[in-house]
Image: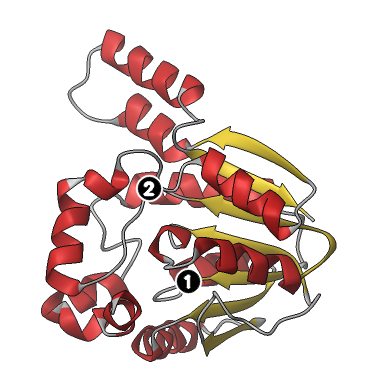
Amino acid sequence: MAKQGEIDYLKNIGQAADHVAGKPFSDQECGPLLAEIGAVLSLLPPPPASLLDLGCGSGWTSAFFARRGYLVTGQDISEDMIRCANRNKSEGNLAGLRFQAGDFESLAFDGEFDCAVFFDSLHHAEQEEAALRAAYRALRPGGVCVASEPGIGHARDPQSLDAVRRYQVTEKDMPPGKIIRLGRKAGFRSHRVYPHFKFLHAALYGPDKTLAQRLGGVLLALFGYRRSGIVVLRK
């Protein structure tokens, strides 16, 4: 049921589909999103590495990776999202970028990529262990998987609860410890965890904050990253 909700999400949200198609620039969190994608880029092997963008949605992350020089395959379970992603690709005149529809819990890639990315997508999986196993299979020896996911408390957030109720999608907590544990089971041999840069961005540049609030936000981002942070797994 939840997978069907993910497949039908774009058609079910109606006029908000234009917002999804225009991300990140249509999003009120554009600044933090750009900060976060910059952090992810810094954790990847250098271009022109081959990159698998898992759960890519409208393809905006894939487009950023392609503009940086990566050879990108964007994947999403929703045919509607893939059509949207291909429109964005055409408008951007991007080479080295392709999209395909499919379930990232059961992809058939085998040793084809230097890196894989879950950018705010793994927490939508029904079986996240299967998704991490598929990412592991898709990577070449020494390849890396970068996961930038919401951490503890996400599933109970009012917006998450509303999305589940209205659109029958999956919303889960996906803290670093869980990703690392399942990554080990999938075969990844090492890991590192980094703070979400979007949290640092919000702490430093958010409006109407005192100096003490900014410093508190920075400390929370730097020392709370094990509750919610960016995970890099190496095959």
Quadrant of the snapshot with the C terminus? bottom right
Q: Which residue is drawn at the image coordinates 40% and 50% (left, top)?
A: 33
Q: In this view, does 39 lie above or below 52?
A: above
Disc 1 target residue: 55
> Residue 23 placed where, x, y %?
33, 66
Task: Say if 29 sits above or below 86 in the image.
Answer: above
Please determine whether, in this image, residue 61 is positioned above or below residue 187: below
Residue 194, position as x, y percentages in the image: 58, 35
Q: Which of marks 1 and 2 is in front?
A: 2
Q: In this view, does 76 lie to the left or right of 112?
A: left
User: Residue 89: horizontal and vertical position, in percent?
Assistant: 49, 84
- The residue located at (19%, 63%) in the rendering is 163
Q: Quadrant of residue 66?
A: bottom right
Instruction: Give the quadrant of residue 157.
Output: top left
Spatial CA span between label 1 and label 2: 17 Å
Percent coordinates x, y for residue 223 in the rendering: 49, 20
Q: Earlier in the sequence, mark 1 or mark 2?
A: 1
Q: Which residue is drawn at 31% across and 65% down?
A: 170
Judged from this view, the residue extending furthest toward the top is 212
Q: Residue 173 carries which label?
A: 2
Q: How many marks?
A: 2
